[in-house]
């Protein structure tokens, strides 16, 4: 449900609506909540940018497994005492998560790893995955300082787990995976697309069509990070992954890794531009954020013929527009990319997501009400300690 008409009325009952100072502009608390609600919720069906978005409904009605049994070759990674690390998401025992609800990781440590999970110590990857030492070193150099900045600014206990870590070949492997890839296909440098999930039986390393409870990251943009997370039945996140081109420019890789981690923690959608209403006619300009449509300059060269039709023809006819390595990060994010930091605005949204007042599975209206009753959720304990 759209909470925007509700927000100004709720705002009037708040004693002090002053929020944080971002980008030299004072934000009202309503602005912050509006941005958070836009980023934290997704009503989009799994693989809606394919020919078969109704698969989600078939799964919910328990029709899908009976008409399309899962062939053995689609069990892409067999690990851990004969079990499958994606089995519980392909065929969840307690049912699928609720669509359009708040998702976040359960309390405790969250780990980020590189590549797909290992299989009994042997690395098994999709055909386009880049496991070269150069790619691993470049991504590691970005991830480690970035996670340190997130811990410092939000207090979220998130850490990097290198491939050689002994836990990587146990059931305690890193649940957020950043997968370097050499190509994405479909004349797009940012996202991989699956044209028809009915062909999954011929692509055993890409059974994404079977993960029907998944939440995609900004599925209708063409130049944002390519990723998704898989919630458990209670809407706590159990697994997340992003695929990022290793041939992109170093700055673009850093920007996409940053966006990936923010979204993998539970913020899958675009932050909307601040709304204007008769109650609050003016809004501050958008703060720098990796959660908005920050890479829109690349949209024009990232159209996909299968989905976008004629606007993609120029890309098809002019391959030079898809040369790898020349991508530039917009000016307003360059300092954050250089220092491998998240923005203050992004830190505030993460702090709100992991505020004790919120729980996985809450709907949008319940979250809005809770946040207006807990006006300090955007201030993490780590941020307050750093001010002392």
Image (tube, rainbow, N blue to C red):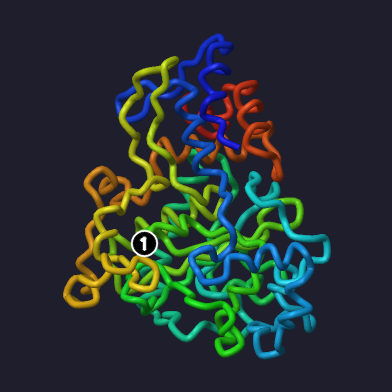
Tell me which residue sits at (47%, 29%) in the image. Answer: 32
Asked if residue 336 is positioned above or below residue 225 in the image, the reply reads above
Please, what secondary structure does the residue beneath circle 1 have? Answer: loop
Q: In which quarter of the image is the N terminus?
A: top right
Is residue 120 in sight in this rendering?
A: no
Mark 1 packing: few (<14 Cα in 10 Å), some, or many (20+)? many
**Residue 132 image point, x, y percent:** 40, 82
| Residue that lies at the very extreme toward the right in this rendered image | 93
Q: Nearer the viewer, residue 284 or 106?
A: 284
Quarter where residue 313 is shown: bottom left
Q: Is residue 182 left or right of residue 157?
A: left
Tell me which residue sits at (29%, 53%) in the image. Answer: 296
Q: In this view, does 342 lie to the left or right of 161?
A: left
**Residue 29 image point, x, y percent:** 49, 22
Q: In this view, does 76 lie to the left or right of 7?
A: right
Q: Is residue 154 left or right of residue 357?
A: left
């Amino acid at each position: 449900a759209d909470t925007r008409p509700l927000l100004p009325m709720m705002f009037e009952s708040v004693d002090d609506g002053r929020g944080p100072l971002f980008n030299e502009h004072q934000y009202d608390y309503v602005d912050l909540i509006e941005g958070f609600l836009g980023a934290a919720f997704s009503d989009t069906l799994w693989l809606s940018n394919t020919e078969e978005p109704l698969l989600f409904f078939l799964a919910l009605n328990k029709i899908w497994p009976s008409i399309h049994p899962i062939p053995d070759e689609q069990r892409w990674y067999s690990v851990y005492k004969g079990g499958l690390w994606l089995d519980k998401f392909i065929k969840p025992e307690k049912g699928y998560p609720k669509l359009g609800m708040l998702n976040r990781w359960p309390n405790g440590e969250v780990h980020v790893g590189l590549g797909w999970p290992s299989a009994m110590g042997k690395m098994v990857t999709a055909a386009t995955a880049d496991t070269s030492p150069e790619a691993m070193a470049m991504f590691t150099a970005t991830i480690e300082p970035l996670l340190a900045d997130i811990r410092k600014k939000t207090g979220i206990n998130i850490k990097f787990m290198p491939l050689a870590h002994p836990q990587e070949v146990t059931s305690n492997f890193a649940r957020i995976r950043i997968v370097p890839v050499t190509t994405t296909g479909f004349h797009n440098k940012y996202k991989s697309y699956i044209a028809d999930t009915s062909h999954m039986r011929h692509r055993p390393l890409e059974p994404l069509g079977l993960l029907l409870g998944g939440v995609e990251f900004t599925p209708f943009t063409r130049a944002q990070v390519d990723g998704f997370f898989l919630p458990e039945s209670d809407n706590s996140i159990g697994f997340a992954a992003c695929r990022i081109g290793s041939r992109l420019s170093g700055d673009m890789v850093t920007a996409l890794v940053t966006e990936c981690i923010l979204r993998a923690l539970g913020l899958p959608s675009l932050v909307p531009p601040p709304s204007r209403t008769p109650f609050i006619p003016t809004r501050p300009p958008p703060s720098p954020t990796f959660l908005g449509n920050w890479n829109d300059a690349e949209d024009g060269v990232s159209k996909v013929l299968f989905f976008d039709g004629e606007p993609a023809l120029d890309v098809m006819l002019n391959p030079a527009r898809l040369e790898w390595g020349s991508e530039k990060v917009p000016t307003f994010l360059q300092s954050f990319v250089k220092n491998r930091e998240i923005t203050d605005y992004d830190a505030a949204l993460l702090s709100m997501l992991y505020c004790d007042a919120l729980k996985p599975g809450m709907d949008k209206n319940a979250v809005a009400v809770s946040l207006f009753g807990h006006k300090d959720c955007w201030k993490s304990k780590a941020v307050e300690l750093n001010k002392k």
